[in-house]
Image (tube, helix red, strand yellow):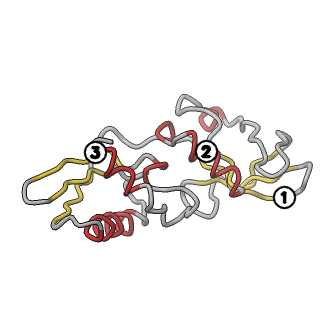
Amino acid sequence: MTFKENIFKILEEIPDPEIPVISIVDLGVVRDVKELENNSLEVTLTPTYSGCPAMKQMEDDVVSKLKANGFKTVNVKMVYSPAWTTDWLTSTAKLKLQKYGIAPPEESTTDKSFITGKHKAVTCPRCKSKNTILISQFGSTACKALYKCNDCLETFDYFKCI
């Protein structure tokens, strides 16, 4: 295992503060890791969106986790370009989201249904039905929308394509 792979493995242990079933690596916000002099690291993160309230917690968790693993100095660098996209979610993250009861993004960022006003059918993470309806563009967090399944009658969050 390379140095970088080892650091990513450590960072996989850090859960997303808003969706603890997935790691910050699964989420795709960890962009790069660089080894610096004197047992120091620079970790590059890209926020899911510029106002994400969880980013400070992620930054603190990265520093704590890596210091606990023997790194003297850990610098976190925020990079906003290119902007984070749900395309960066790992397939593992999507599966974990579904098992947790959150419908993962079904399409890539090329999905523009919100522009046309036509709401796509989102698969219910509980019963797998596509007979669902958008309740609100705003779910439990800004990155999720609220849907209802017309078959099992459960409401669920959908991780929006960004």
Residue at image point 36% right, 68% down: 61
| Name of the residue lying farthest toward the left | 37
> Where is residue 52 shown, x and y percent of the image?
42, 60
For badge 3, the amino acid type reads Lys
Label 3: which secondary element: helix
Q: Which badge, 3 or 1, is on the more N-terminal residue?
A: 3
Report the Cα–Cα distance between label 3 and label 1: 42 Å
Report the Cα–Cα distance between label 2 and label 3: 24 Å
Q: Which residue is mark 3?
A: 4
Q: Which residue is mark 1?
A: 154
For badge 2, the amino acid type reads Lys
Q: Which residue is mark 2?
A: 94
Q: Is residue 19 above or below residue 114?
A: below
Label 2: which secondary element: helix
| Name of the residue lying farthest toward the front | 1
Q: Quadrant of residue 56?
A: bottom left
The answer to whether 53 appears left or right of 22 in the picture is left
Asked whether the residues under the numbered discs 2 and 1 touch, taking CB atoms below 8 Å apart as contact, a structural biologist would say no
Q: Nearer the viewer, residue 76 or 72?
A: 72
